[in-house]
Amino acid sequence: MLTKVLHKLVARPLVYDAVQKFFGVEECHRQLQPFLELTAGSLVLEVGAGTGDWAQFLPPTARYIWYDNDTDKLGGFRAKKLSPLAVLADAANICLKDKSVDYALCVSVSHHLTDEELDNFLRQLAQICRKKLIFMDGYRYDSSLISNLMWKYDRGSHPRYPDAIQAAIQKWFDIDRKAEFSVYHHYLICTGTPKR
């Protein structure tokens, strides 16, 4: 019951952004920034974009496409006026042409997907992406009590160990750069070029 109430409350864009800030999104921004600098002059698709917070951290010459299936989050994104480009659709069936974007940005999405869904998701990203995937998500770290508590109440029910995440990505992308850090969760960041 408590979990359902929390999920409903956090689904509201202003509350969602406040919760993200409380749980260390600023450190996530700082850690991901060097990876986002790669996107200068490019078309960037963020899948599972939430309220589009990452758009403001792209270089000014990058063009951003918001992609998510949550109408409330779309409202939060539109209120920020960060980009006119938005697609309201499910990431299980990405409705874009092959090689239609330069970069695919995927932040905190994989733990919402089953193994089968994650494989399908990454396969589609490899098809639509010309240059690179930029990926970041939290991973399971059993000895962290705070992280375990956060995973208990997270809407995503599929946190994975870092080796499992990397194996899933490497099926469709050649990983060329990676980093790990922690705030409350432990995070993996990596970039990869699509396998052709």
Image (spheres, rainbow, N blue to C red):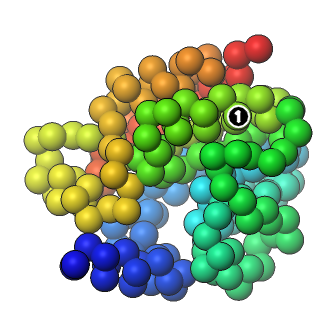
Q: Is residue 144 above or below residue 149?
A: above
In the image, residue 124 lies at what x, y percent? Answer: 70, 34
Residue drawn at (71%, 28%), measured in percent from left and top?
A: 126
- Above or below, 117 relative to 58: above
The structure residue drawn at horizontal position 76% and vertical position 14%, both measured from the top left corner, is 196
Residue 80 visible in image: no
Q: Is residue 43 above or below residue 65?
A: above
Residue 157 lies, in percent from the top left, at 33, 52
Quadrant of the rendered image containing residue 133: top right
Q: Is residue 11 or residue 55 the one in the foreground?
A: 11
Residue positioned 78% across, 62% down in the render: 87
At 53% across and 39% down in the image, what residue appears?
117
Residue under label 1, please give it.
124
Judged left or right of residue 30, residue 142 is left
Evaluate whether residue 161 shows in this view.
yes
- How busy is the neighbourhood of tag 1: few (under 14 within 10 Å), some, or many (20 plus)? many
Image coordinates of residue 49 in percent, x first then y, are 62, 60
Describe residue 42's horizontal placement relative to residue 94 as left or right: right
- Label 1 residue SS: helix
Q: Amino acid at mark 1?
A: Gln
Q: Is residue 176 or residue 4 the one in the foreground?
A: 4
Picture coordinates of residue 1, whole percent (x, y) = 22, 78
Answer with left or right where residue 194 lies relative to residue 191: right
Q: Quadrant of residue 6?
A: bottom left
